[in-house]
Amino acid sequence: MNKTEVLKQYFGHSSFRYGQGELIDNILSGHDCLGVMPTGAGKSMCYQIPALMLDGTSIVISPLISLMKDQVEALHQSGVPAAYINSSLSAHEYFSTLNMVAAGRCKLLYIAPERLLAEDFTAICRNIHIPLVAVDEAHCVSHWGQDFRPSYLKIIEFMAALPQRPVLAAFTATATSIVKEDIVNILGLEHPFRITTGFDRDNLYFEVRRPESSAKDAELLSLIREAQGRNTIIYCSTRKNVERVCDMLNLNGCKAARYHAGLPDEERKQAQEDFIYDRVNIIVATNAFGMGIDKSDVSLVVHYNMPKDVESYYQEAGRAGRDGSPARCILLYSKADVRTNEFLIDHGHEDSALSDEEIETIKERDRERLKQMTFYSTTKRCLREFMLRYFGERTGDFCGNCGSCNASFDTLDITISTQKILSCIFRLKQRGILGSKQLVSDILAGRKTKEITSAELTTLSTYGIMADTGPDKISEITEYLISGGYIEESDDALVSTELGEDLIRTRRTLLMKQPKRERTASLPMPSPEKTEVNEDLFALLKALRRKLAATLGVPAYVVFTDASLREMSVKMPMTTAEFMNISGVGSRKAERYAKQFAEVIGEYKKKNHL
């Protein structure tokens, strides 16, 4: 079978997404690969399909117990012999899996990086054919990645111990240029084929809301009620907030589970399974939850607190709408979030084995990332354009599907105000002073602070020239200029950039959007259907899926995704061949489930005289 036939037979899709075919072809041709693909873009297909086409057992290295379990269960449902090795296995299960691998009865083996160098595992690997090693979440190998894991440094040692070097393919959802180079160099990828498929997820609606800290709970409750029982993830920055927010939701009649690293293992596992198996539709969690969770039908992701960096935010928000359905990603921002993250950055490496110099370098990197995340949270620009530009992609400045683009704005001409702010920075520099945002604002507003009077800054030509503007508006315009690259903030000092100096020279007009209201009026929860759907039949099909999943002990989406059920509700397939024309229904699933789902569809058609 060729790759398209494998795709159809095992996974039920007729065509590849952008980048998947090229990565698969290069792996099959023996080339190392680096694939940077956003959450929901189908990274797993890029190593699963070659593994099915190559002789031997392919190995997938992943730090994520939940992802291993989900993907192995899904592969079993599609008729693929697969297994995993991680800390969740008992000794009996571990050795049974090793025996299965040694006997050649496993096409795909998922393993945690901590287990790679176990003597009994490496002994088996020396005696079986391994055509491919795939590294998932590959950014974990880099100190510059948002989730560095020292265990990933064992991968190159594992590769070196094999009698014959397999193809090595690395995959990640988010990576800056520095992280990409680290992945290639640290893992030892040899002349790899590289592809970044683009970070845009056009089915996701992004919005930042800026309620007062005391109003966050009410804002969150409003969002939950708009979601009308659809699956929701709420991220909080601290364990304390997880506990408090989860209790608040339950007290208000919203059944929610909690998840953070401070809970006992059994309680944490139970919360995760309750969410995956649809026993609760809301989970409140720290960022310890969700990495690798393959739940396809999350309709809302709310960040109750601002994350430390854009990479983490985009990855966590991207857990919404993985089946391609419209979904919402809402950030509830307050200034207190910045202070919390600064504390986490300053105290996040106290138990690290890194040197003081390495720790300080990482802290400096994290502070810069926090600054960019703060810009995202306060910008009036298109939110999608902001994120894509952060990851090195150029796009239009209006997406039509984010809180900024859908807000009602006044457009302000800030050309003269910009000239005054840049001029003040320049005049201070002439006196050998690098001014902070506060100092520049105070000078322009004509304030007589101790710092201004003692340095005789009232004699500056820019002193008081924006007194009629007010300090709050001066600060807002200054933030806009920083986020637009006209000014840089270094060590709490403002410095004009080349772009800012060019603006002064050319006297170009500069416009700034100003919301007419504090935030976008509440938008209705988008319907998850991209196409027409028969709601009544859809509900019946979901009930059957839930029953089958409970019998099998697997998450409902492992049987069929919501997207597949929606298509069934419209096309109403009755034969195995017709079911195989539904996206996401491969031959094994059609053989296993078509009859039962056809019975429900047939009863519905009969009842409604269709």
Image (cartoon, rainbow, N blue to C red):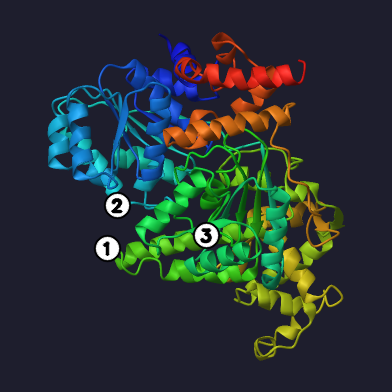
**Helix, strand or loop under label 2:** helix
**Vertical arrangement, residue 378 with respect to residue 82, above or below:** below
Q: Residue at 79%, 82% (x, y): give it.
A: 446
**Residue type of the residue flagged with mark 1:** Ala
Q: Picture coordinates of residue 274 (x, y %)?
A: 49, 49
Quadrant assignment for the N terminus: top left
Dot 3: few (<14), some (14–19), or many (≥20) neighbours within 10 Å? many
**Helix, strand or loop under label 3:** loop
- Left or right relative to 147: residue 174: right
Dot 2: few (<14), some (14–19), or many (≥20) neighbours within 10 Å? few
Spatial CA span between label 2 and label 1: 10 Å
Q: Picture coordinates of residue 64 (x, y %)?
A: 37, 44
- The answer to which of 135 and 567 lies nearer the viewer is 567
The residue tagged 1 is: 353
Quadrant assignment for the C terminus: top right
- Left or right relative to 191: residue 447: right
The residue tagged 2 is: 150
Q: Picture coordinates of residue 130 (x, y %)?
A: 24, 25
Callout 2 touching callout 1 (CB < 8 Å): yes
Badge number at residue 308: 3
Q: Residue at 39%, 62% (x, y): give it.
A: 361
